[in-house]
Image (cartoon, helix red, strand yellow):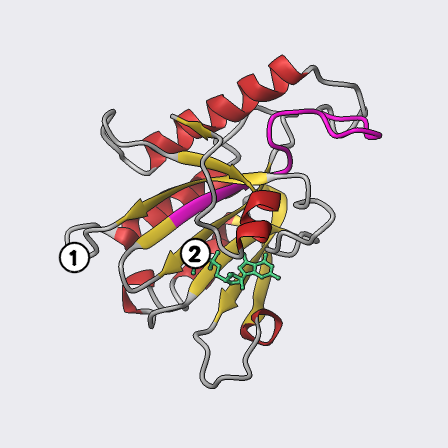
Amino acid sequence: VKHPLQNKWTLWFTKPPSGKGDNWNDLLKKVITFDSVEEFWGVYNNVAPVSELALKSDYHLFKEGVRPEWEDPQNKHGGKWSYQYKDKRSVDVDRLWLNIMLAAIGETLEDEHDGEVMGVVVNVRKAFYRIGVWTRTIGKSIPGRGDGDVAGGKGRSSEKGKEILMAIGGRVKNFLELPSNEQVEFSGHTDSAHSGSTRAKAKYTV
Ligand code: M7G
């Protein structure tokens, strides 16, 4: 018996650059798509744990049909909640990444019909591990689109959008097991794209 997930999810991997000519697109690869709890564990048990990945690797677990890129139509008006663990040796990154993946596929990062969560990402860098949750909006409704109720296309006020986003931030902070004095930060992808990096100015913090 397979226990179906509410959504289909695709695991992606960014391999570290091997030469100079490598660009973002050459390095980003689809690993597999799954839609049941059992298949998730099959995948999880057969890929390298984050703690064993080389520097500059990423895993991305995104809803099927959404590329883990700022440019994707479903990401381009969005942003991400993220946190950088700078003490790499003391953090159990494998467990925290599992926490956030289970929260994503179990749909516990947001309320039903919020339609915000696009995917989760872990980056392995020299100075830190970063775990992030990508959202479809930056807490404002997107002009020209029926925002919010994805199925029904009903509008959503900016106050409501911000409220949903902040609630997701609070849950991310819990799943990442952060003490109250540490902050998860939200930044919009357009800021990331312009600054050429994800180290853009934080818009919100929780
Ligand atoms: P990062 O991995 O998000 O953060 O971005 P880091 O700076 O802490 O390593 C590193 C680089 O990867 C960026 O400067 C971009 O060159 C490239 N990159 C990352 N992302 C998420 C994207 C993306 O969505 N689209 C494109 N075109 N490049 C990206």
Dot 2 corresponds to which residue? 41
Is 73 situated left or right of 135 in this image? right
Give the residue displayed 32% in from the left and 54% down from the top. 129
The kind of residue tagged 1 is Arg
Q: Position of residue 102 (x, y in %)?
A: 43, 43
Res 181 → quadrant: top left
Region in magenta: 131-147
Q: Position of residue 111 (x, y in %)?
A: 56, 23
- Per the image, label 1 sits on a secondary structure element best described as loop
Q: Is residue 13 above or below residue 161?
A: below
Q: Position of residue 91 (x, y in %)?
A: 20, 50
Res 191 → quadrant: top right
Label 2 Cα crowd, 10 Å radius (few <14 / some 14-19 / many 20+): few
Magenta stretch secondary structure, dominant: loop
Give the residue displayed 47% in from the left and 86% down from the top. 19
Question: Which residue appears farthest toward the front when viewing the image?
Answer: 195
Q: Is residue 155 above or below residue 129?
A: above
Q: Position of residue 1 (x, y in %)?
A: 54, 49
Does the stretch in magenta take in 72?
no
The kind of residue tagged 2 is Trp
- Per the image, label 2 sits on a secondary structure element best described as helix
Mark positioned earlier in the residue sequence (1 or 2): 2
Res 176 → quadrant: top left
Give the residue displayed 59% in from the left and 55% down from the top. 68
The answer to whether any part of residue 35 appears in the image is: no
The quarter in which the C terminus is drawn is top left
Residue 89, disc: 1
Mark 1 near mark 2, Cβ–Cβ under 8 Å?
no
145, 65: nearer the viewer: 145
Give the residue displayed 33% in from the left and 63% down from the top. 49
